[in-house]
Amino acid sequence: MLFAALNVLDGSVIGRNMQRHWHKEFIRFLNAVEAELPHDKAVHVILDNYASHTRPAETQRS
């Protein structure tokens, strides 16, 4: 699973390829983003739970 963060001001990308798409991997990615950014900068996050678009309703986890 690829997670990526784009800096729209300079076009740089912070990316991580994770084995699975679990919350632990996502939190690890967010921590990596936080570690690479200056502490005085705000981070704006846009997320999409794409799994809800690809799974039939009967197989979705609650």
Image (cartoon, rainbow, N blue to C red):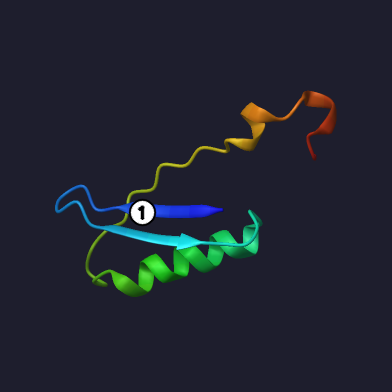
Residue 10: percent from the left, percent from the top? 14, 54
Q: Looking at the picture, does residue 37 appear above or below residue 44?
A: below
Residue 7: percent from the left, percent from the top? 24, 53
- Asked whether, in this view, residue 32 is left or right of residue 1, the answer is left
Residue 5: percent from the left, percent from the top? 36, 54
Q: Residue at x 56, y 62 (%)?
A: 18
Residue 40: percent from the left, percent from the top? 22, 69
- How packed mark 1 is, by other alpha carbons closer than 10 Å (few <14, some 14-19, many 20 or more), is some
The quadrant the C terminus occupies is top right
**Residue flagged by tag 1: what amino acid is it?**
Ala
- Asked whether, in this view, residue 11 is left or right of residue 34, the answer is left
Instruction: Name the quadrant containing residue 57.
Output: top right
Q: Looking at the picture, does residue 1 appear above or below residue 61?
A: below
Instruction: Name the quadrant containing residue 54.
Output: top right
Query: Circle 1 sits on which residue?
Result: 5
* SS category of the residue bearing label 1: strand
Q: Residue at x 19, y 51 (%)?
A: 11
Check the image and name the residue furthest to the left.
Answer: 10
- Asked whether, in this view, residue 6 is left or right of residue 58, the answer is left
Q: Residue at x 59, y 63 (%)?
A: 25
**How many labels were placed on the picture?**
1
Q: Looking at the picture, does residue 56 appear above or below residue 43?
A: above
Check the image and name the residue furthest to the right.
Answer: 58
Q: Nearer the viewer, residue 15 or 57?
A: 15
